[in-house]
Image (spheres, rainbow, N blue to C red):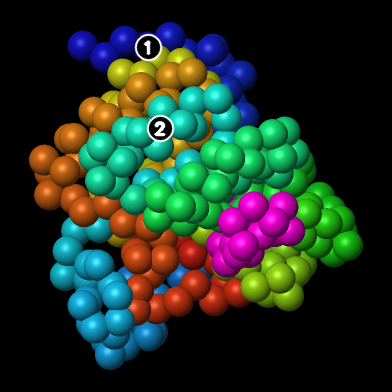
Amino acid sequence: MFRSRLRRRGGTVVALLAAASLMTTLSGCGVDPLTPQEAREKAGSDDKPGGTGRRVDCAEVKCIALTFDAGPGKDTPRLLDILKEKQVPATFFLLGSKHVDRYPEVVRRISDEGHEVANHTWTHRILTDLDAAEIREELSRTQDAVERITGRKPTLMRPPQGRTDGTVSEVSRELGLAQILWSITAKDYSTDDSALIEQRVLEQAHGDGIILLHDIYDGTVPAVPPIIDELKRRGFTFVTVPELLAPGKAEPGTVYRPEKD
């Protein structure tokens, strides 16, 4: 039986409010998300797996993307060991202040081991509360910090709490960043119960899904091996976000969000 040690109600209320805010923001400000399927269909099918380096065709295979926000942290090296052992690629939306600048060697390892390095702002400020110059500062500082370490600027970003609007989209477009939301969340910020985190992910898993986890919370990394094992057993193939969209490419400023089955 799965055990639950929830940090009571506050986390749940915050999550519900965040979800409501996300829907309001997306629907009220002219932001029209694309699904991975729409991104692939829009691009056509000229780029076949094996032709130009694509590993898998997510139009034919049941794909799922594992993503981690707000790291790197002290547990990220252990997470990378797990991903390497299980041969699973992931997408890391990195936080600049006290993370990228504190763990540059881990950032370098994420990149060197073939994972996608992405942007989660510098200080996790809610971008829809900021003006364009402030949004640009939050994203640019992390872009520059990652480039200094890896030699490459990210092409993907995830707005904190998923909150975006027209201004965020325009600044993202200027900086060459596509916006990546999610469809599966364990709300691992609200519990350190690894079994509960596992249960929540597995209950929501679907083809073309994007899983949101955080490699900075104590219960998350221990939940990753059983999540991977069970999803593989169910026939899922793990991919990075760019692989999920291929042959489409993540267009700067565009918001991508899977639809749940």
Left or right position of 144 against 112: right
Q: In the image, is residue 174 above or below residue 187?
A: below
Residue at horizontal 61 percent and vertical 19 percent from the top = 10
Q: Quadrant of the N terminus?
A: top left
Q: Secondary structure at mark 2?
A: helix
Q: Nearer the viewer, residue 34 or 135?
A: 135
Q: Which residues are magenta?
A: 143-158
Q: Determine which residue is flagged by label 1.
A: 4
- Residue type at numbered disc 1: Ser
Pointer 1 or 2: first along the chain: 1
Q: Secondary structure at mark 1?
A: loop
- Residue type at numbered disc 2: Leu
Question: Is 147 one of the magenta-colored residues?
Answer: yes
Q: In the image, is residue 112 above or below residue 253?
A: above
Disc tally is 2
User: Residue 133: in sight, yes or no?
Assistant: yes
User: Residue 126: in sight, yes or no?
Assistant: no
The residue carrying pointer 2 sits among few (fewer than 14), some (14 to 19) or many (20 or more) residues within 10 Å by Cα, namely: some
Q: Quadrant of residue 95?
A: top right
Q: In the image, is residue 28 above or below residue 77?
A: below
Question: Is 258 one of the magenta-colored residues?
Answer: no
The residue carrying pointer 1 sits among few (fewer than 14), some (14 to 19) or many (20 or more) residues within 10 Å by Cα, namely: few
Residue 91, given in percent of the width and then of the height, sits at 45, 51
Residue at horizontal 25 percent and vertical 58 percent from the top = 63
Q: Nearer the viewer, residue 214 or 98?
A: 98
Residue 145, given in percent of the width and then of the height, sits at 72, 52
- Name the front one of labels 1 and 2: 2
Q: CA distance from mark 1 to mark 2?
A: 23 Å
Q: Determine which residue is flagged by label 2.
A: 79
